[in-house]
Structures are given as C-alpha cells and as structure tokens.
Amino acid sequence: MNYISGVKLILDGTPLERLACMRRAYKDKPGDYGRLNFNETEIKQYIQYCLAHKQQILIHAVGDSSIVTVIRCMRALHPDIFWKDKRLRIEHGEFAVISPEDIATLKQLGIVLVQNPAHLALAEVMAARFDNAITKYLPPLQTLINNNIPFALGSDGPINPFLNIMLTTIHPNNPNEALTVEEAVIAYTYGSAFAEFRENEKGTLSRNKLADLAVLSQDIFTIPKEQLPATKSLLTMVNGQIVYDQLD
C-alpha cells in the first residue's frame, strides 16, 4: 500500500554540524556560514526537472540563506501565482521565518513546511549557534498555524509519534511556538496528507476516505504532556482492515 512520489534535494545540512547555510556567521564559529550543496543553476535545473516530470518538489533546507536561495530560484523561473498550487515542500525550514515579511512570502508562494519534532529538543545547540536576533520564531509552528501557512509534522527522528507530539506541545527551543495536542495531531494527519496532495483520500475520518485509525491506550487530549510518550495503539486499522489487535 506504499507509493513513492516527489524528488528530494538535500540543499544544506543542519545546525548540529554547522552545515545549515546561514546569512549570518555561526555565533560559536565566526566566519562559518554553513554551505549549499548545489548552486542556483543546479537548483533551477532540479526544479525544472520536477515540473517537467510532474513530481512534487521536496527541498531539505534549514538555514535562512538556503530558503532565500530557493525562493529566488522559484521567482526566477515563474511568477508567484504559478507556484501557489504546486505545494513546493521545504523539509525542516527551521529558519523559514526570520521576520514578518517571510510569512507573507511563504503564503504568496504556497510553500508547505514539514517540521520534525525531534529538532525541537536542540535548545542548547541552537542557543550556542545563533544570536537571539534570528531565533524569535525558531522553529515556527504556532506562527504557521496563526498565518494559515500549510505545514505538517514529519517522522524524521524518534519513531514514537506521541513523544514527538509531546515535544511540539513543550517546544524546548521556543515555548512561544508550542502547539496544543490537537494542533499537533492535525499537523500529523491532515497536514501530512495535504503535504503530499492526498487530503482527499486520508488525513481526516470522513466519508469516502481511507479508514486509517487507531484505538489508543490513553486519552492523549486529557493526560499530562509528560505521559504522552507512553501511549500505545491497542488496535490499528488500515483502509478499514484491522492489522493489529491487542483488544481480543
């Protein structure tokens, strides 16, 4: 029941190894800005290839310089209105929002951000690497919801989704950007379906959609946040068929 689509470009690395490409040098290593793995000519060729082959554009971009470069390439190829329904995806995008102007740009271009909760637990690293001047929204979650920017929670990190939900509700990097449990679940389900053009097939429990659901061991909407990682599935259905059952 799996399928593969989209072509992913790894444009930069992460702040852990100081490979996220930034417009300002790393605070703890002056003169080091990270790096791009591809130049603008190559990025445009990649984008044109995806468009020609009707493949979704998926770009791993963490640093603000990387994201600005992607946007510059998009606009060099086509006007903003062209991109609105393409759902170009930025995977991670920790520095996608540095200022309010960035919010407007993301909305104009219809960019989808896919955040990964495990990265929210890097508060000490982020504090060491970056000045407060660029970390107001780091990484944006609640800001995206407040501004109707489509985003999803992905699975790059621990495989326990309830640990990841806990991290989004605490947001150790930036508590101001924390989500409610309900917002995190929606980002995991509907948000992820929208991010892959499949919101008409899955992502919500609705008539004529896939009956993918789970019966959980505890009510994740009422328990203390710290208890979320202990949640287990007692029964799992995929497309209406029971594939796991501990209730018998």
Image (spheres, rainbow, N blue to C red):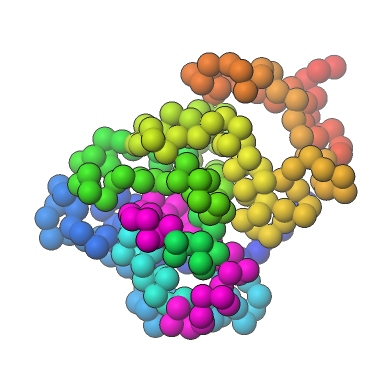
Q: Give left or right: position of 15 versus 164.
A: left
Query: Which of the two residues, 212 or 225, is positioned nearer the viewer here?
Result: 225
Residue 142 spot, x, y in % from top left: 47, 41
Residue 181: image quadrant is top right
Tell me the residue at 39%/35% (across/down). Answer: 176
Q: Give left or right: position of 30 versus 213.
A: left
Tell me the residue at 33%/54% (across/down). Answer: 98
Q: What segment carries the magenta color?
A: 75-103
Q: Is residue 197 above or below residue 243?
A: below
Query: Which of the two residues, 10 or 63, is positioned nearer the viewer here?
Result: 63
Tell me the residue at 59%/64% (across/down). Answer: 87
Residue 248 visible, this angle: yes
Tell me the residue at 20%/47% (across/down). Answer: 131
**Number of numbered markers:** 0
Query: Which of the two residues, 168 or 229, is positioned nearer the viewer here?
Result: 168
Query: Which of the two residues, 14 or 167, is positioned nearer the viewer here?
Result: 167
Q: Residue furthest left?
A: 30
